Amino acid sequence: MNLRLITKGNPEKITVLLLGFLLIMSACNTTQSNAVTNPANTTSTPSAATEAPPAVSDGKSIVSGGNTFILGQTTDIQYLVPFRTTDSRSGLVIYYLSEGLVRYEGSYNLVPCLATDYTLSDDGLVWTFKLREGVTFHDGSPFTSADVKFTYESLLDPDQKSNQRVEYGFIDYIETPDDLTVIFNLKQPFGPALYRFTMGILCKEYVQSNGFDQNGYANYNPVAVGTGPYKMVDWKPDVAVYLAANESYWGKVPDIKFVEVRPIPDNAVRLAAFEAGEIDYIMGIPPIDVDRILADKGKYEGYVYPGIGFTYLTWNTQIELFKDPVLRQALTMATDKDEIINNVLFGHAVKCITPYSPAHVAYIDIGEPFPFNPQKAVELLEQAGYTKGSDGIYISPKGIRCSFETLVGTEGTVNTEIAQILQQRFKEVGVELKLTSMALGLIYDIMDAVIFGEAEEETYASMIGAMGINADPDITRYMHSGGGLNDYRYMNPDLDALLELGVVTFEAEKSKDIYREVLEIFAYDLPCLFLYHAEAISVSQNIFSGFEATPYGNINNLSNVSIR
C-alpha cells in the first residue's frame, strides 16, 4: 500500500518534487485509521514503561523449539533515541520500537504509518499531516501532534547534539492546531522532505516526566518507549536487547511474541551459533562462508542485495597531513581495491568511486580518475615535492612525515584485514599506516567529540568504517561541512553549495547535473579513500515466511513474519 499524495490546487506539485529528485513513488488511497486498546498496568516510572508480557520468553531460538526470535548482529546498540542514533544496529531496534509519520516498505517505497494523509501547499513550503487516531505509546500515553512537534524540535535543538540536525535545517517552525494535525512550515521547498518524516516519534510526556531531555537521555535505552509493534523489556549491554510484542499495537500484532537482539562481534562465533540452531537470523556472515551458507537452501533462506552503503578509510582532512589532495590521490592509487574485494570479501562487493553504488537511484558512472597504479602514486608524490627519509617514509613539502594512525574496530576481522592490506600497500609507496584497535563504539565517541567541537581535530587521523546512506540522493549529513556524520572532516564550500542546491532543485535534468558535479568532487578531491560497496547479505533459518530484508540487511517488517 503506497502513500497517498494530496495537493491543494496543484496535483503535479509532489510529482514534480519527487521526479525532480530522481525518485518515483506511486500513490493510492490510505485514509483508513485503526483503533487500539490502551495498554494496562502502566505506571509513571521508567522501569514500568512496558507492561508484563502475556507469557515469558524462554530465551531459546524458534528453530530449536523455543518461543523467542533470536537475531544475531555484529555490535551492540548505541542509542535508542531516534534522532541521536548514528549506527544501523541501533536503527534496527528503533524500527521495532518507534515509528515515524511514514515508513519504508521494502527498499525505497514510503507508506503511511503514524500519519494517514498529508497535503503539500502549491509553493512547496507547508506540509500538513493528519495523524492516525487511537494510537498509544507503550506506557499508555496517547499519541498526539504534541509528540511529533516535541520530537522534531528536540532534534533541531543544538543542545541535544543530534548528528542529524543539519538534515532537518529545512524546517522553519511547526504548528499543532489540534491533537491529530501537525503542520511543518519550511524555509524553502525541500525535495527529500518526505523521507525525513520517517523519524521515530518520542513520547513527550514520558521523556519530560523522567527528565531524559535534560540529562542527555542517560539510561533511556533499557526503558525506551515508542508506538511500534514491539516493546522494550530490557537491555543488558553486550548481552542482548529483549523485546516483547505490543499486544495493543494499532496495526498487525506480531505473531512472533519475543525477540532477542544479540551482539556477537566475532563473525565465526556468530555463524557457528546460527548453524547450531541457537540463532534464527544473522547479519554479517564471514565472507569466506557466504557461498556455502547460501547454497544450503534446505536449511537456510538467504537474502542478498546489492548494497547502497560504502566502506571507506577516512582521513581527517582538517589535520595538516591530509590537507594536501596530492597525498590523498597517491594513497588512492596505491590501493588495489580488487585485491580487497577478492581476497577479503570473496567477490561479494564492487569497487567504490563515490558514495553512490550502482544500485543507488542517484548513481552516475563517472569513471575512475585514480585507478590502482603504485608507480604513478610515487611519481605524483615526488613531483609535488615529497622527499623520502632514511627510513623509506616520505616527508611532505611542509616537513610532515607521512605517518598516521588508523582506528579499527575490534568487532569482526574484515576491517582489520583491510587495514593490514592497506598498511602494506601504503608502505610500498613510502607512507606509514599504524593500526590501533578498539571497540567501534569508542571510535564513534571519538569522532562525535571532534564533530561537536568537544575535542581537537588531531584527536584522530583516520579510521576504517562503513556508511549506509539514505535512499534518496541527499548526502548532506555525510559530506556537508556541517554534517553530523562528516567523519572525514571534509570542508568544501563548493560542495556545500551544490548539496544545498540539490535539495531545492526539482527539474530532473538540472538535478542530475548538480549531482554529477557532486560526484566529480568526490572522485577527484577524495574526502576519503572509497573502497567498496558490499552486498547486503543476511540469512534466516528456513522455517519462516514473510521476511523482507532490505539493502541494509535489516528486517524492518518483523511484525509480518510468521512460522511455517
Image (cartoon, rainbow, N blue to C red):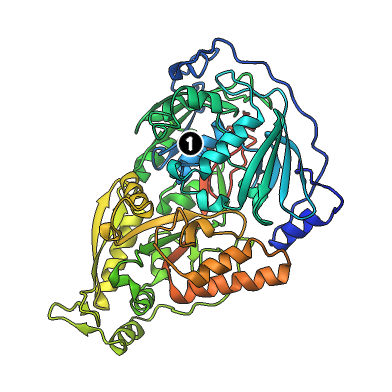
Q: Residue at the spot x=57%, y=47% of the render?
A: 303
**Numbered disc total:** 1
Q: Residue at the spot x=29%, y=62% of the render?
A: 461
> Residue 563's quadrant in the figure?
top right
**Which residue occupies the foreground of this view, 457 or 48?**
457
Residue furthest right as drawn: 9
Q: Residue 388: x, y in percent?
A: 19, 83
Residue furthest top as drawn: 41
Q: Is residue 27 left or right of residue 179?
A: right
Q: Is residue 426 left or right of residue 491?
A: left
**Which residue occupies the foreground of this view, 504 or 185?**
185
The kind of secondary structure element at disc 1 is loop
> Residue 6's quadrant in the figure?
top right
Q: Quadrant of the C terminus?
A: top right
Q: Residue at the spot x=37%, y=63% of the render?
A: 313
Q: Residue 47: x, y in percent?
A: 43, 18
Residue 260 shows in this picture: yes
Q: Which residue is mark 1?
A: 81
**Which residue occupies the foreground of this view, 82 or 257?**
82
Q: Is 86 above or below relative to 20?
A: above
> Residue 338's quadrant in the figure?
bottom left
Q: For label 1, count other residues whose C-alpha is less than 10 Å away and answer few (under 14), some (14-19) or many (20+).
A: many
Q: Residue at the spot x=36%, y=80% of the render?
A: 326
Residue 348 shows in this picture: no
